[in-house]
Image: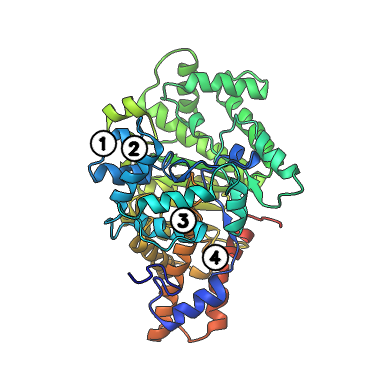
Amino acid sequence: MSLFIKDDFMLNSQSAVKLYKDYAEKMPIFDFHSHLNPDEILKDKKYTDLTDIWLLADHYKWRLMRANGVEEKYITGEADNYEKFLEWASTISKAFGNPLYHWTHLELKRYFGIDTLLNEETAPQIWRISKEMLGPDGLSARELLIRSNVKAVCTTDDPIDDLESHRKIAEDQNFSIKVLPTFRPEKALGLEGQGFLDYILKLESVTGAKIDDFDDLVEALKQRAEFFKSSGCVVADVSFESPDFTVSSAEKAKSGLKKVLNGEKPDSYEIEAYRTELMLALGRIYHKLGFVMQMHLGVERNYNTRMFGEVGPDRGFDAIGESISSKSLAALLDGLAKTKELPKTVIYCLDDKDNNMIISLLGCYQEAPAAGKLQLGSAWWFNDHLDGMRKQLKTTANFGHLSAFIGMLTDSRSFLSFTRHEYFRRILCDLLGGWMESGQVPMDYELLGEIVKDICFNNAVKYFNINF
């Protein structure tokens, strides 16, 4: 069988090959949005086998296995690691067109030197080879970061987290990769959530201040954001379903919170007003601290209520939901812009039909001195595939300034997922190389090559103001 992942993989012209080999391939990685566990980096975690590092926390793979008719015991259940791996091998062997097919074979090649296609026949050999490279004396979390040419990575963290792992990593003079926290106050925004009151108590505990009203809450979050900044934080994040930021009332936000603190139930208007007013307050905090504000929009969580009850959240039962309206998003952006407190902002939408609407709206608020101050984020989650990435790149070029785009991220819990940067870079170079071949852009490798390098790494470093 001929080699699958070759040097020209996904590069369909000589121009694309040259852009990739000469400009993209060796660029470092700044992964500004991930779900890696910082404690695993601090302790330099070792992994027993491919299931341990690949399958135990990857809802992308779990969904595909369910779609292939695999029983749940081999996905999140009691089957042993080898049995789970065999089911994954059977599942991925014919998953053509799914990005997991490409990612799987890129990861096997880059981290384990395995060129063999993964299927039921090859699974035992691949298991044996990879297991010899893992285990107590094998590849570790830190070594995988180093091998991936990662220079900095941002984890996802709650305002109440102590960030002890981040601080200890930063103090380790034998490890130069930056591991930075991300301020994600999602639980504070969920006024209607079952665990909201418990969360407020935890926030009171870490701040040492009583939260009796809305102003107290904002002050507590501001204190934690300042603490995050002292620990290297440069970015905030939040995920919404379909918020209505046109509902804005400081009075209703305060009354809604007061009701919850008193054990009463807020009405729907108070819930929306609370979310709007708190996002406006957070946006002002981010602007003052120099944080980039990321927003992930349009996900509906835990549709399968039976499975949610059995295995919990983040297990592959989320889907594309209704996205935000342009008026709603504009209300938030305009509320911050009118007082000149709009921070750098990156918007990710789960339904790519909204790309045009969002990027055209972002164009209304671009301003000096930052190039691309407001960004349409890279193709996210269900769009994280060849067509989705190409579409996002072309939309950014058509509506904005592609050369200012901050590029790719993993959004992953796996230390093998950095091949997604390679995947993105190949798609980027294939797109630009195709434009060169067709005469849509100049046949100028130095010019296009610098743009490639900027999108791969340099733009994000500048945008997030990272110092190496």
Per the rendering, the mark at residue 358 is: none
Q: Kindly report the distance in space between the C-alpha atoms of the residues bearing marks 2 and 3.
A: 31 Å
Which of the two discs, 2 and 4, sits closer to the camera? Answer: 2
Per the rendering, the mark at residue 71 is: 1
Query: Which is nearer the N-term, disc 2 or disc 3?
Result: 2
- Please report contact status of discs 2 and 1: CB closer than 8 Å, yes or no: yes
- Viewer-proximal residue, 418 or 229? 418
User: Residue 6 occupies which quadrant of the picture?
Assistant: bottom left
Say which residue appears at 59% left-offset and 33% top-offset.
159
Q: Dot 3 corresponds to which residue?
A: 377
Q: Secondary structure at mark 4?
A: helix
Query: Which is nearer the N-term, disc 2 or disc 4?
Result: 2
Which of the two discs, 1 and 3, sits closer to the camera? Answer: 1
Q: Dot 4 corresponds to which residue?
A: 456
Specify the quadrant that holds the C terminus: bottom right
Instruction: Report the side of 327 relative to 277 (left or right).
Output: left
Q: Kindly report the distance in space between the C-alpha atoms of the residues bearing marks 2 and 1.
A: 7 Å
| Type of amino acid under label 1 | Glu
